[in-house]
């Protein structure tokens, strides 16, 4: 009888600890976002608003895939343009993911955060939309538009509860 009582007491004292731990885990889910600008595009026709990548851009898209090879992505987002899709494609293939499209003009940051909570996400955008998206996540105007000759910025934003951290790397 004493042994049963002791086991029941141990079980009951562990129950609140276990339920608190579960609650803590769901509220502090860590989300990590990787933002890049599309790779080098074809500039031969200035009237073409939807150019493809040039050979150097295709190589950079492969390079991004190699740089990010140790990250298991849960989702990959791109604007619906040839250059961004072609930049995201090698990483999407390696992660066996379908590219999801987003429209930066219609971005609901809270909806995006809810949908991607606890996930690792790659976002491919443009010289203006990439830093704007990062700024929306940060809740401040920290980053300026990317210089048109720069296709090497990697922004990493981590969200854990109310804590947000960010890093900008130049990956040549």
Image: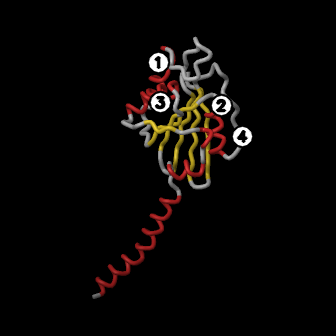
Front disc: 3 or 1 = 3
Q: Which residue is mark 1?
A: 59
* Residue 128: mark: 2
* Mark whose residue sits in front, 2 or 1: 2
Measured Cα–Cα span from mark 2 to mark 1: 22 Å
Is the residue 110 above or below the residue 151 in the image?
Answer: below
Residue identifier under label 4: 141
Residue 138 in the image, given as x and y percentages of width and height: 65, 45
Picture coordinates of residue 22, whole percent (x, y)? 45, 64
Taking the spot 50% from the left edge, 54% from the top edge, the residue there is 29
Comes first in the chain, label 3 or label 1:
1
- Residue on which disc 3 sits: 88
SS category of the residue bearing label 1 = helix
The mark nearer the N terminus, 2 or 4, is 2
Judged from the image, the secondary structure of the residue bearing numbered disc 2 is loop
* Separation of residues labelled 2 and 3 (CA atoms): 17 Å
Of label 4 and label 3, which has the lower sequence position?
3
Instruction: Residue 28 in the image: state x and y as whole percent.
Output: 53, 56
User: Closer to the N terminus: mark 2 or mark 1?
Assistant: 1
What kind of element bears circle 4?
loop
């Amino acid at each position: 009888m004493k042994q049963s009582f002791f086991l029941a007491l141990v079980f009951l004292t562990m129950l609140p600890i276990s339920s608190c731990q579960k609650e803590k885990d769901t509220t502090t889910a860590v989300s990590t976002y990787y933002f890049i600008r599309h790779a080098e595009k074809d500039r031969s026709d200035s009237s073409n608003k939807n150019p493809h990548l040039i050979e150097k851009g295709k190589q950079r898209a492969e390079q991004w895939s190699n740089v990010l090879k140790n990250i298991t992505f849960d989702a990959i987002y791109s604007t619906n343009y040839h250059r961004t899709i072609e930049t995201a494609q090698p990483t999407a293939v390696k992660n066996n993911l379908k590219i999801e499209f987003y429209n930066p003009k219609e971005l609901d940051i809270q909806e995006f955060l809810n949908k991607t909570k606890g996930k690792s996400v790659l976002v491919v955008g443009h010289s203006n939309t990439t830093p704007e998206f990062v700024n929306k996540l940060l809740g401040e105007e920290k980053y300026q538009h990317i210089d048109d000759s720069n296709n090497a910025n990697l922004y990493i934003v981590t969200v854990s509860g109310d804590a947000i951290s960010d890093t900008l790397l130049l990956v040549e």
